Image (cartoon, helix red, strand yellow):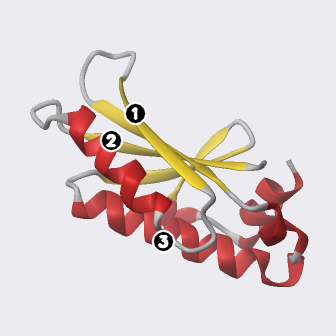
């Protein structure tokens, strides 16, 4: 099962375990999502904390390459909106070994993710 990993920055003042649980639960209800889990993790610099969102993407979505880019972009946009509704910010998607900001994702990035 392919996984899409997203990173969000969060304020330390929030109850991030509850925020992460809510993000995982809400994301699991999206179309084209098999399962989603999220967890809060402190950043190495000791400042902000991030919430990781791990989404299981159905293999059927990957096989239908003609619609893949649109479906992935829609899924990422939906997860971004859910995260922001919970007070999270600066969403980034893992593409290979890079974290690409949501607003900088290109069709090439989405194809690269699909080929991993």
Numbered badge on residue 113? none
Numbered badge on residue 39? 1
Q: Residue furthest left?
A: 13
**Residue at point 48%, 43% (across, down):** 37
Q: Tell me the mark number nearer the camera, choosing from 2 and 3.
A: 2
Numbered badge on residue 77? 3
**Residue at point 34%, 16% (across, down):** 45
**Residue at point 73%, 61% (across, down):** 109
**On the image, numbered disc 2 is attached to which residue?**
20
Is residue 65 rendered to the left or right of residue 36? right
How crowded is the residue under tag 3: few (<14 C-alpha within 10 Å), some, or many (20+)?
Answer: some
How crowded is the residue under tag 2: few (<14 C-alpha within 10 Å), some, or many (20+)?
Answer: many
Q: Kindly report the distance in space between the C-alpha atoms of the residues bearing marks 1 and 3.
A: 19 Å
Quarter of the figure with residue 62: bottom right
Residue 9's spot in the image, x, y percent?
32, 42
Is residue 67 rendered to the left or right of residue 12? right
Q: Earlier in the sequence, mark 1 or mark 3?
A: 1
Helix, strand or loop under label 3: helix
Is residue 57 rendered to the left or right of residue 73? right
Residue 11's spot in the image, x, y percent?
18, 38
């Amino acid at each position: 099962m392919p996984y899409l990993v997203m990173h969000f920055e969060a304020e330390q003042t929030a109850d991030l375990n509850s925020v992460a649980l809510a993000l995982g639960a809400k994301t699991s209800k999206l179309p084209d999502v098999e399962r989603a889990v999220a967890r809060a993790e402190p950043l190495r610099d000791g400042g902000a904390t991030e919430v990781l969102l791990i989404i299981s993407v159905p293999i059927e979505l990957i096989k239908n390459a003609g619609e893949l880019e649109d479906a992935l972009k829609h899924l990422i946009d939906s997860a971004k909106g859910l995260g922001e509704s919970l007070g999270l910010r600066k969403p980034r998607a893992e593409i290979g070994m890079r974290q690409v900001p949501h607003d900088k994702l290109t069709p090439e990035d989405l194809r690269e993710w699909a080929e991993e």
